[in-house]
Image: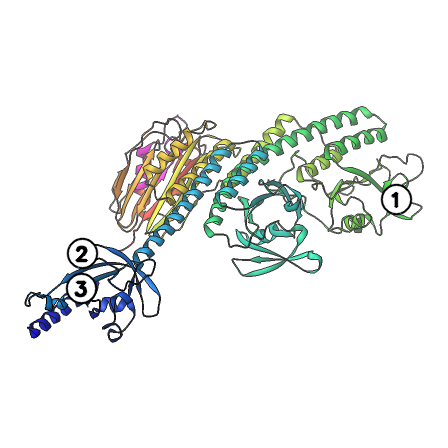
């Protein structure tokens, strides 16, 4: 009987070794008789040190209480949640099930009941808990991502098309602070000579944490970020005597730079993003935290998306403000011109009236500059009884250092008042004065205003060049127009105003000025709305955009291509109804929203439907758009698309066949109840997907005939054999030939050679 029992025990021992659970075979009193490898792996112990010990010394209840009479688990096969003590003394959570068993080959008489055995099955819950923690962490990341996405779209929806700069900036900054859990945000816009604070979030307006109002060029975070040319995560540390100096530490490049604390932001850590419009600098957006931290790269990505959108809105608002300012200055020029024409021979009286008008509209003070016989040098008239001697000639003091007319974000290739400069001897000369010039340094050292414009009217005999004597009160031919340090420097429009005034050019029709201003604004938007295609392995791209208008008014055509994970790409081509600033603004908003939807993983139909809901829910949107969105799986060589009101795209196979993508839906932004259809196609390596806006097929010849889809199809068949490179340019050449180089609408074309990715 003993031999049979031992044989039975050996069989049980072999069985527990092949199970995936951790198992212990114990005597009825809890003595461990055998453990399998799985349990040894959990315990991190050796068999010899465990066999013979008591199971009650290994398993404990959650309160870690040991029972002297019975094991801490039931023996009916029910789950028990306990703690398993490891060899090193630590504990892990486990689930325990146990049963009493006995050998069938020996009787269970009372004297043989010590042959009963406990089969204890133990499963570690540590991996389950770890998975739960991982799930909670991923859920938290997903919630944060959803918050960033909803916050970004909320910014776009709440600010799109606004003409009020304070409302625009306040809405953007406060929403960013809430979305990214920051302590504050600021925005600086580029002005002449530096950056002016234009917006702060709630909580940064009181004096204790007030950011600097103006940061000159060469100082502060703005200059550092502009030199970098991209977003930066930064840390500010105050050092030096009296805490006048500090250190700006770049968390991305691990480099540091010195920083004047009067130009420092009120944050300990910040993410700073430059706002570009084309190649022009509009300003700097700063998002900061008062505590030491490391901004997440995802937060910086959100800021970059917002700045891309904000650049369009800002240039529109700034352009509107610029247009209003030009109108004010134009009316001032008209009034001054009337004064000059009515003055007759009283030039001194006319100049006095003119200077009063200039000082009022520019908010500056005027200081005559002339030769002082008593001082025997050129001098500045600080007041009627005090003059400041200039140590040097006019050339040395004012014209030895040339400063730029403007650094503002609006291009200044032409005067706002259509003024043409002349370099002939005796012509009017204007030059900026600030702390970087000899004249500015001298004025500052005497406590006088030191930033403004010096005007030299030339040697024409129309003004005084000497103090004292008859007519000492003017008219003057040299003058300083200065503003105090707390004021903004004179900007480029005001510079043009002074230049136009002092040159006394002929009057310019207000309507012509307004038209010229609109043309410059549109040209600026044309630069900023340039579309781009990401480089995607497996796709070779060729694209072209051509403006049909003679005055560079902006059309609404746009396109972009995104490279997604898992060998996928999304191509977007759209056309907004109308032209001008509103059309460009809507194009930027649509591109931003569709890009966000693409990264969220939506299908083309879902992207277009979501965009339609967003546009129709926004009451200020009056335009609509057509769009073609295609999502390309380069490994599976299949593409899904949604064509919403867009002309049908074409797939050119390498064997000379053309497939029209005819699954069509309605336009976007017109009807909330619109439903959009999805289409798909497969492709072989070398096939070309050709997309275009309606300006291509709707081009007309001299007789009024349309270019048409069939003509486009034939040209593509003839030209695609030479490859995708230059294909769009060849189509444009055919369009110019057909229409006599007089297109009625803008055209955008994109050709993608789909090579795919080998498995």
Percent coordinates x, y for residue 259 in the rendering: 64, 56
Q: Residue under label 3, please give it.
A: 118
Report whether 251 appears left or right of 729.
Answer: right
Q: Which residues are magenta?
A: 691-717
- Secondary element at image label 1: strand
Report whether 594 appears left or right of 428.
Answer: left
Q: How many marks?
A: 3
Question: Is there any visible trace of residue 547 in the rendered image?
Answer: no
Q: Residue under label 1, please give it.
A: 387
- Secondary element at image label 2: loop
Asked whether disc 1 touches disc 2, contact meaning CB atoms under 8 Å apart, the reply is: no
Report whether 78 appears left or right of 431.
Answer: left
Mark toward the start of the polypeptide (1 vs 3): 3
Q: Quadrant of residue 660?
A: top left
Percent coordinates x, y for residue 743 in the rendering: 44, 32
Percent coordinates x, y for residue 88 in the rendering: 34, 70
- Asked if residue 100 lies in the magenta stretch, the reply is no
Report whether 71 appears left or right of 582.
Answer: left
- Using the numbered discs, state the Cα–Cα distance from disc 1 to disc 2 in whole angstroms: 108 Å
Mark toward the start of the polypeptide (2 vs 3): 2
Q: Is residue 226 above or below residue 588?
A: below
Task: Please tell me how crowded label 3 is: few (under 14), some (14-19), or many (20+) other residues with Cα within 10 Å.
Answer: many
Camera-nearest residue between 674 and 40: 40
Mark toward the start of the polypeptide (1 vs 2): 2
Task: Please tell me how crowded label 1 is: few (under 14), some (14-19), or many (20+) other residues with Cα within 10 Å.
Answer: some
Q: Residue under label 2, please give it.
A: 76
């Amino acid at each position: 009987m003993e031999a049979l029992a031992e044989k039975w025990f050996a069989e049980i021992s072999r069985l527990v070794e092949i199970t995936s659970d951790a198992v212990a075979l114990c005597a009825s009193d809890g003595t461990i008789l055998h453990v399998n490898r799985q349990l040894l792996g959990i315990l991190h112990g050796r068999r010899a040190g465990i066999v013979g010990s008591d199971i009650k010394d290994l398993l404990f209840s959650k309160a870690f209480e040991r029972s002297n009479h019975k094991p801490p688990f039931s023996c009916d096969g029910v789950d028990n949640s306990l703690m398993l003590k490891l060899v090193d003394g630590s504990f892990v959570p486990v689930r325990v099930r146990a049963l009493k068993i006995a050998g069938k080959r020996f009787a269970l008489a009372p004297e043989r009941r010590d042959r009963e055995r406990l089969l204890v099955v133990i499963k570690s819950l540590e991996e389950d808990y770890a998975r739960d923690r991982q799930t909670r962490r991923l859920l938290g990341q997903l919630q944060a991502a959803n918050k960033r996405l909803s916050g970004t779209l909320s910014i776009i929806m709440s600010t799109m098309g606004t003409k009020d700069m304070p409302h625009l900036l306040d809405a953007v900054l406060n929403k960013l602070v809430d979305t990214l859990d920051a302590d504050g945000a600021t925005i600086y816009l580029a002005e002449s000579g530096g950056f002016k604070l234009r917006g702060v979030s709630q909580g940064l307006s009181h004096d204790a944490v007030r950011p600097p109002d103006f940061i000159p060029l060469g100082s502060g975070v703005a200059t550092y970020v502009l030199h970098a040319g991209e977003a930066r995560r930064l840390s500010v540390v105050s050092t030096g005597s009296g805490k006048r100096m500090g250190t700006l530490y770049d968390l991305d490049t691990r480099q540091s730079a010195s920083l004047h604390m009067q130009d420092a932001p009120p944050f300990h850590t910040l993410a700073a993003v430059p706002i570009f419009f084309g190649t022009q600098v509009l300003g700097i957006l700063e998002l900061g935290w008062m505590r030491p931290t490391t901004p997440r790269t995802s937060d910086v990505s959100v800021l970059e998306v917002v700045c891309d959108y904000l650049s369009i809105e800002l240039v529109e608002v700034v352009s509107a403000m610029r247009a209003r300012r030009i109108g004010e200055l134009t009316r001032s020029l008209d009034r001054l011109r009337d004064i000059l024409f009515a003055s007759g021979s009283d030039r001194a009286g006319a100049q006095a009236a003119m200077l009063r008008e200039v000082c009022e509209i520019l908010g500056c003070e005027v200081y005559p500059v002339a030769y002082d016989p008593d001082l025997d040098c050129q001098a500045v008239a600080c007041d009627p009884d005090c003059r400041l001697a200039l140590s040097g000639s006019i050339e040395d003091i004012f014209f030895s250092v040339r400063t730029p007319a403007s650094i503002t974000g609006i291009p200044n290739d032409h005067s706002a008042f259509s003024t043409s400069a002349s370099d002939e001897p005796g012509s009017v000369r204007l030059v900026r004065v600030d702390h970087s010039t000899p004249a500015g340094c001298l004025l500052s050292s005497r406590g006088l205003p030191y930033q403004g414009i010096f005007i030299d009217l030339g040697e024409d005999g129309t003004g005084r060049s000497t103090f004292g004597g008859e007519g000492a009160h003017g008219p003057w031919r040299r003058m300083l127009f200065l503003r105090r340090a707390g004021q903004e420097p004179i900007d480029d429009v005001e510079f043009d105003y002074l230049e136009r005034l002092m040159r006394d050019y002929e009057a310019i029709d207000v309507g012509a000025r307004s038209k010229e201003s609109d043309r410059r604004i549109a040209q600026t938007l044309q630069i900023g709305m340039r579309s781009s295609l990401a480089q995607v392995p497996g796709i070779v791209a060729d694209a072209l955009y051509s403006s049909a208008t003679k005055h560079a008014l902006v059309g609404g055509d746009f396109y972009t291509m995104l490279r997604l994970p898992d060998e996928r790409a999304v191509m977007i081509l759209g056309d907004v109804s109308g032209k001008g600033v509103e059309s460009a603004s809507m194009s930027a908003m649509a591109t931003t929203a569709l890009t966000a939807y693409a990264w969220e993983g939506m299908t083309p139909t879902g992207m277009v439907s979501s965009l339609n809901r967003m546009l129709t829910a926004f009451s200020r949107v009056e335009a609509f758009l057509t769009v073609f969105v295609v999502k390309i799986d380069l490994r599976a060589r299949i593409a899904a698309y949604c064509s919403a009101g867009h002309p049908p795209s074409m797939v050119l196979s390498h064997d000379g066949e053309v497939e029209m993508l005819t699954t069509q839906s309605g336009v976007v932004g017109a009807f909330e109840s619109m439903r959009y259809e999805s289409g798909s196609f497969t492709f072989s390596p070398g096939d070309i997907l050709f997309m275009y806006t309606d300006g291509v097929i709707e081009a007309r010849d001299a007789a009024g005939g349309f270019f048409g889809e069939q003509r486009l199809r034939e040209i593509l068949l003839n030209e695609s054999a030479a490859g995708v490179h230059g294909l769009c340019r060849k189509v444009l050449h055919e369009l110019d030939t057909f229409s006599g180089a007089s297109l009625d609408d803008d055209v955008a074309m994109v050709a993608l050679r789909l090579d795919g990715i080998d498995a």
